[in-house]
């Protein structure tokens, strides 16, 4: 080998060694730079791949009855979601996952493909715990579980229209759930966490916002009475083949709503479409022409105006009265009746004579003062004000028919509220669903007149009255029956609304109830036949549950079949 060749070989060795040394120095320098100078950057990049901001679910407040018994509660459940890109890379797991979730595998894969650019897609909300655990054990890439809450209603259809329901996100949609959603809902929290590739939280990084749980809502409803009233209402509606029915029970001294039931109803716990026929809280939203239940207020107006008194005699013969070309009839010729007997027998002719003898403005004022034509103020979504036309627009015939409950529309709650004012010596209160609400009364009728009216209404449930079926053994009961024809396109047909509103015990009224049965079929359709016995059952249950002492221990229950109006 020549000297020149040896020098070239040595040079190549040194060059190669130098390049290797430079590469090593470069690698070391880069490592030092990354580990020392850019630590925060690398950490942020790593966390960005596994760091997630997650919601901290908060429980919705419970709805409780007056005794603290649950009417609506939220229970924790798991929901399944997916990262579409990650799950599609493990597409062989999709058929198994779809089978567990009772879904179509092809449809699931199609949905994931359409949303492949997203990081979050719900697969199934609110599954049972056993299924959630099976999915967790599979550790399918891109499939995760998230804690949520599901609303549960222990009373089911019994309180459905009052409580309403929430959607799948636990937001109130109907009833008190909607009206008090802000109170019940609370505020979810948020935090940053590091998750592993299976979506499991391995480290809490930062609390962004603490969760604020919803507040409980205590109602005036008594769950026991609510159940008993619903049971008896359902039985009555089915017995008489009626289209629907409602019952409202109030506390006379406070205006608290102790029970409010409707039938048909629905089960808010069922994962099925809610039928529109059972969704409405008919006691608040549906109106009716009340019929003879309005007669006490017309009589009160006449007595207040000084044109009538309890023992004044009216001649109702021959049982028909001609007004503006129309005949107003009684069920028979009652002859001479006192004003008290006009209520006892429910004489249309007698009460129309009183109504036409007073100024229209005064009759309107009496109805308006008792709350007819205006919302009661419960705050319930969709509550109806009913209809009470201004007296300046009344014709003579309209003034006459208003005296026995035609030409205006009211809700069952309005009937109960107005009857409670008679029972409470002329003091009207705003009905309330909320326990411990400030609910001062205001006077709408002289106490002496209200007490006289209460005594007159007691005769309605006596031996000569139309409401004998409303009696409650051991208690003095006052009230008024009502039977009204339903309006049709061509006038009034052969369909009816049967009603009864009253209170007990008369000596010291505690409870008031209004019963409405819509469109009973068959020969029995009078308020005294259909609604009064239901009132008796509900009132008896309420008096027993609230430990109200009897005020007529010697009275034995003797319902008389066939009483009318």
Image (tube, rainbow, N blue to C red):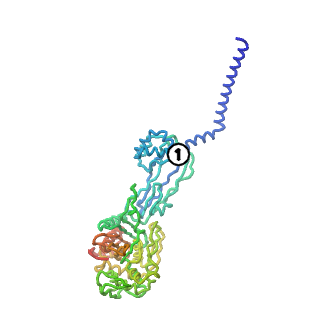
Residue in front for this viewpoint, 550 or 117: 117
Q: Is residue 450 above or below residue 40?
A: below
Residue name at image x 44 percent, y 63 percent = 175
- Mark 1 crowd level (few <14, some 14–19, many ≥20, 10 Å Cα): few
Where residue 268 appears, as percent x and y from the top left, is: 40, 58
Q: Report the side of 245 relative to 88 (left or right).
A: left
Q: Under tag 1, what secondary structure?
A: loop
Res. 365 in view = no
Counting the numbered discs, the total is 1
Q: Position of residue 75 (x, y in %)?
A: 43, 53
Q: Which residue is label 1 attached to?
A: 119
Residue 238 x/y as whole percent = 30, 65
User: With respect to residue 80, does 423 lie above or below?
Assistant: below
Residue 392 sits above or below residue 2 on the image? below
Q: Quadrant of residue 6?
A: top right
Residue 214 visible in this rendered orientation of the protein:
yes
In the image, is residue 18 above or below residue 542?
A: above
411 and 4: which one is in front?
A: 4
Q: Quadrant of the N terminus?
A: top right
- Residue 457 percent coordinates (x, y): 35, 79
Image quadrant in which the C terminus is located: bottom left
Residue lying at the far right in this picture: please name it: 4
Image quarter of residue 9: top right
Direction top: furthest residue: 1
């Amino acid at each position: 080998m020549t000297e020149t060749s040896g020098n070239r070989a040595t040079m190549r060795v040194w060059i190669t060694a130098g390049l290797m040394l430079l590469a090593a120095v470069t690698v070391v320098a880069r490592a030092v730079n990354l580990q020392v100078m850019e630590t925060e950057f690398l950490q942020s990049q790593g966390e960005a791949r596994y760091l997630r901001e997650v919601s901290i679910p908060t429980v919705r407040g419970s709805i409780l009855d007056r005794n603290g018994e649950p009417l609506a509660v939220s229970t924790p459940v798991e929901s399944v979601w997916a990262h579409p890109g990650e799950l599609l890379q493990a597409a062989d797991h999709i058929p198994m996952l779809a089978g567990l979730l009772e879904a179509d595998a092809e449809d699931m894969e199609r949905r994931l493909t359409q949303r492949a650019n997203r990081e979050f897609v719900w697969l199934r909300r609110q599954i049972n715990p056993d299924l959630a655990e099976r999915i967790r054990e599979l550790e399918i890439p891109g499939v995760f579980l998230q804690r949520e809450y599901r609303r549960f209603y222990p009373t089911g259809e019994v309180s459905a229209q009052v409580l309403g329901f929430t959607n799948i996100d636990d937001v109130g949609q109907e009833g008190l759930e909607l009206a008090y959603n802000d109170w019940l809902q609370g505020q979810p929290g948020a935090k940053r966490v590091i998750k592993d590739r299976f979506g499991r939280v391995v480290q809490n990084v930062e609390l962004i916002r603490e969760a604020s749980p919803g507040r409980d809502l205590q109602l005036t409803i008594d769950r026991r009475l609510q159940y008993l009233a619903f049971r008896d209402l359902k039985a009555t509606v089915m017995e008489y083949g009626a289209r629907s029915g409602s019952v409202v029970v109030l506390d006379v001294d406070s205006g608290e709503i102790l029970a409010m039931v409707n039938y048909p109803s629905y089960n808010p716990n069922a994962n099925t479409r809610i039928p529109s026929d059972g969704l409405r809280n008919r006691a608040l939203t549906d109106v009716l022409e009340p019929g003879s239940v309005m007669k006490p207020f017309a009589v009160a107006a006449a007595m207040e105006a000084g044109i009538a008194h309890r023992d004044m005699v009216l001649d109702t013969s021959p049982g028909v009265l001609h007004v503006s070309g129309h005949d107003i009839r009684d069920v028979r010729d009652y002859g001479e009746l006192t004003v008290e007997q006009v209520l006892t027998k429910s004489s249309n002719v007698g009460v129309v004579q009183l109504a036409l003898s007073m100024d229209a403005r005064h009759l309107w004022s009496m109805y308006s003062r008792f709350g007819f034509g205006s919302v009661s103020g419960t705050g319930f979504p969709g509550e109806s004000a009913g209809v009470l036309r201004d007296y300046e627009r009344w014709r003579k015939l309209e003034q006459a028919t208003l005296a026995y409950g035609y030409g205006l529309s009211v809700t069952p709650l309005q009937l109960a509220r107005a009857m409670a004012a008679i029972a409470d010596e002329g003091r009207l209160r705003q009905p309330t669903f909320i326990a411990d609400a400030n609910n001062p009364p205001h006077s709408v009728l002289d106490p002496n007149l209200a007490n006289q009216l209460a005594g007159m209404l007691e005769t309605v449930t006596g031996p000569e009255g139309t409401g004998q079926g409303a009696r409650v053994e051991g208690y003095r009961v006052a009230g008024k029956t009502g039977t009204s024809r339903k309006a049709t396109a061509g006038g009034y047909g052969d369909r009816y609304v049967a009603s009864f509103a009253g209170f007990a015990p008369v000596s010291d009224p505690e409870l008031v109830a209004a019963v409405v049965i819509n469109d009973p079929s068959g020969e029995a359709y009078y308020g005294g036949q259909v609604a009064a016995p239901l009132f008796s059952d509900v009132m008896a249950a309420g008096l027993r549950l609230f430990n109200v002492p009897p005020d007529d221990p010697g009275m034995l229950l003797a319902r008389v079949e066939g009483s009318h109006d």
